[in-house]
Image (tube, rainbow, N blue to C red):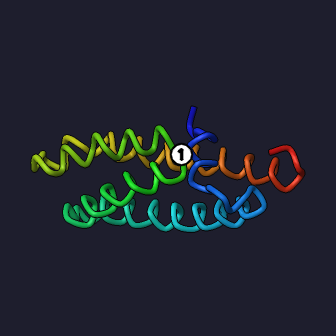
Amino acid sequence: MLVDTKELMFFLGDLGTEILPSLIDVFLVDTGENIKKISQSLENGDYESLAREVHTLKGVGGTYGAVEMKEAAVNLDKRFKSKEALSSMRDDLLKLIDIMRATCSEMEKLKQECTSGNV
């Protein structure tokens, strides 16, 4: 499961499901930017920028119920904090990008369900 809708609904609280499409739009835009930043930072070998992006994704994943994204970010964040070499994390960072893209696809589907009244 990429998105835990129970966690997402908890995040919504009293706002109600009518605000969900707007929140998903924010997630999609922000996550798209995160993917670009991670990709560029990987290309440039920018360790500090990658560490910041991964740390940010822990919170984003938790807030939006993006379970796998959060798990991957938590694991990578620990590795950055222990100063693990970037070369040994490269494959897992690329996997994180794949998870982020898949999560965006699932969020798009959820948004469509919401706008058609199925949530």
Q: Which residue is mark 1?
A: 65
Question: Of the residues shown, which amino acid type is indicated by label 1?
Answer: Gly
Picture coordinates of residue 24, whole percent (x, y): 65, 60
Which residue is rendered at x = 19% and y = 41% of the image?
88
| Quadrant location, the C terminus | top right
Which residue is rendered at x = 36% and y = 66% of the image?
40
Picture coordinates of residue 12, whole percent (x, y): 62, 56
Image quarter of residue 25: bottom right
On screen, residue 71 versus residue 80, left or right, reads right
Few, some or many C-alpha atoms within 10 Å of disc 1 (few <14, some 14-19, many ≥20)?
Answer: many
As helix, strand or loop, the secondary structure at mark 1 comes to loop
On screen, residue 26 versus residue 78, left or right, reads right
On screen, residue 90 versus residue 61, left or right, reads left
Which residue is rendered at x = 52% and y = 45% of the image?
66
Picture coordinates of residue 78, whole percent (x, y): 20, 44
| Quadrant location, the N terminus | top right
The answer to which of 33 and 7 lies nearer the viewer is 7
Picture coordinates of residue 11, whole percent (x, y): 56, 54
The answer to which of 98 and 23 lies nearer the viewer is 23
